Image: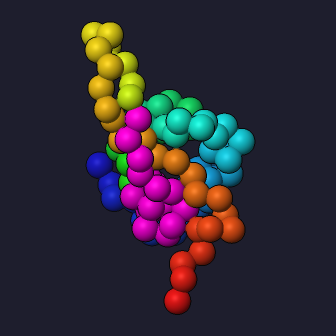
Amino acid sequence: MTAIRESELNAELQRLMGELSVKQSADGFTSLEMSEKLSISEDKARKLIKKAIQNGHMKVEKRNRMNILGVTQSRPVFVLVPQAKSKKRK
């Protein structure tokens, strides 16, 4: 498996932000939900999420999700930060 280059990650991050802004859910997305919506691997989705959080484009929250057994669990979800608020303060 080859490592994702920084430039490829930035390009994918821009695509991710564009697609998710159209598909945004009030409840946010788990990494699995995001990978399914964007048709990418969960590993790649996690790398993009990490980059988006570092850049202030996403934040992590907790939401209840039902697992495969039908049990509700508190899971981390990733929510887009509105662009006006995503700029880092100096």
Residue at the far bottom in the pictured view: 90
**Magenta stretch: residue 49 in it?**
yes
Give the percent coordinates (x, y) of residue 64: 38, 29
Question: Observer-nearest residue: 79 or 20?
Answer: 79
Residue sitting at 52 percent across and 48 percent down? Answer: 79
Q: How many marks?
A: 0
Above-or-below relation of 77 to 68: below
50 to the left or right of 27: left
Q: Which residues are magenta?
A: 48-63
12 to the left or right of 53: right
**Magenta stretch: residue 7 in it?**
no
Give the percent coordinates (x, y) of residue 77: 42, 41
Give the percent coordinates (x, y) of residue 34: 50, 37
Question: Observer-nearest residue: 55 or 38?
Answer: 55
Give the percent coordinates (x, y) of residue 29: 49, 37
Residue at the far right in the pictured view: 22
Above-or-below relation of 57 to 35: below
Residue sitting at 66 percent across and 37 percent down? Answer: 23
Which quadrant of the view contains residue 48? bottom left
Which quadrant of the view contains residue 41? top left
**Residue 75 seen by the camera:** yes
Which quadrant of the view contains residue 42? top left
